[in-house]
Image (cartoon, rainbow, N blue to C red):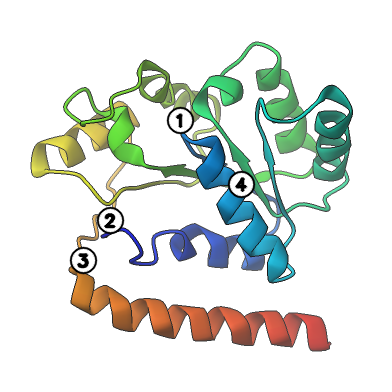
């Protein structure tokens, strides 16, 4: 899907409807901050954990996560795979469950992708450690070769591959935003 084509809605909307925590792997602090701010502005319980936070704020957010107050957690692959974070991830899964792993900017998984990052290639360990947790990979920039590499590197089993043009996405995005607003209204008006 192209940039601005509604990729984020593919994991944000299900996160509101499913029990547990959706973990979004995102490569850029500014992207995490923008997405979380937008979600929070719309009353959605989202947060991020990254190096821009001090220890006190990090602990507060971790507590909120463990208390089930957060639906979407944005984290960089480097933090997600760190020795300190992996036990926290397991604790999340046993106490409240991980509903989905969403790998944003998934072209970074591929050695053929233009923004290759070695930490993204290590994300396959999520599939090994959490084989029953759904995983989706989203990108605006993936050739056929890169798509194949993403599927292989993340060990995605029989994935649904959706390729969209910009004109089709404008309509879908507007419809999805309307649906998301209706769901939020229903959820908050009960």
- Secondary structure under badge 1? helix
Residue sticking out furthest to the left:
144
- Residue tagged by mark 2? 160
Instruction: State which quadrant residue 98 falls in.
Output: top right
| Residue matched to label 1 | 127
Any mark on residue 33, and which? 4
Q: CA distance from mark 3 to mark 2?
A: 13 Å
Frontmost of labels 1 and 4 is: 4
Residue at the disc numbered 3: 164
Decide: marks 2, 1 in contact (CB < 8 A)? no
Other-residue count near label 3 (Cα within 10 Å), few / some / many at <14 / 14–19 / ≥20: few
Cα separation between marks 4 and 2: 29 Å
User: Does dot 3 land on a helix, a strand or a loop?
Assistant: loop
Task: Indicate the quadrant containing the N terminus: top left, top right, bottom left or bottom right.
Answer: bottom left
User: Of marks 2 and 1, which one's residue comes earlier in the chain?
Assistant: 1
Where is residue 110? Give x, y as percent.
24, 28
């Amino acid at each position: 899907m192209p940039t601005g084509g509604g990729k984020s809605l593919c994991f944000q909307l299900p996160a509101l409807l499913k029990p547990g925590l959706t973990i979004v792997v995102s490569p850029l602090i500014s992207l995490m901050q923008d997405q979380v701010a937008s979600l929070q502005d719309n009353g959605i319980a989202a947060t991020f954990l990254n190096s821009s936070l001090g220890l006190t704020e990090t602990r507060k957010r971790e507590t909120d996560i463990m208390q089930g107050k957060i639906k979407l957690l944005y984290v960089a692959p480097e933090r997600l795979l760190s020795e300190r974070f992996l036990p926290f991830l397991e604790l999340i899964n046993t106490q409240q469950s991980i509903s989905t792993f969403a790998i944003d900017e998934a072209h970074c998984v591929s050695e053929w992708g233009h923004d290759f990052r070695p930490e993204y290639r290590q994300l396959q360990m999520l599939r090994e450690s959490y084989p029953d947790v759904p995983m989706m990979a989203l990108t605006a920039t993936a050739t056929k070769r890169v798509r194949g590499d993403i599927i292989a590197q993340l060990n995605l089993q029989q994935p649904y591959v959706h390729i969209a043009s910009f004109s089709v996405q404008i309509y879908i995005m507007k419809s999805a935003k309307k649906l998301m607003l209706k769901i939020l209204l229903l959820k908050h008006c009960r």
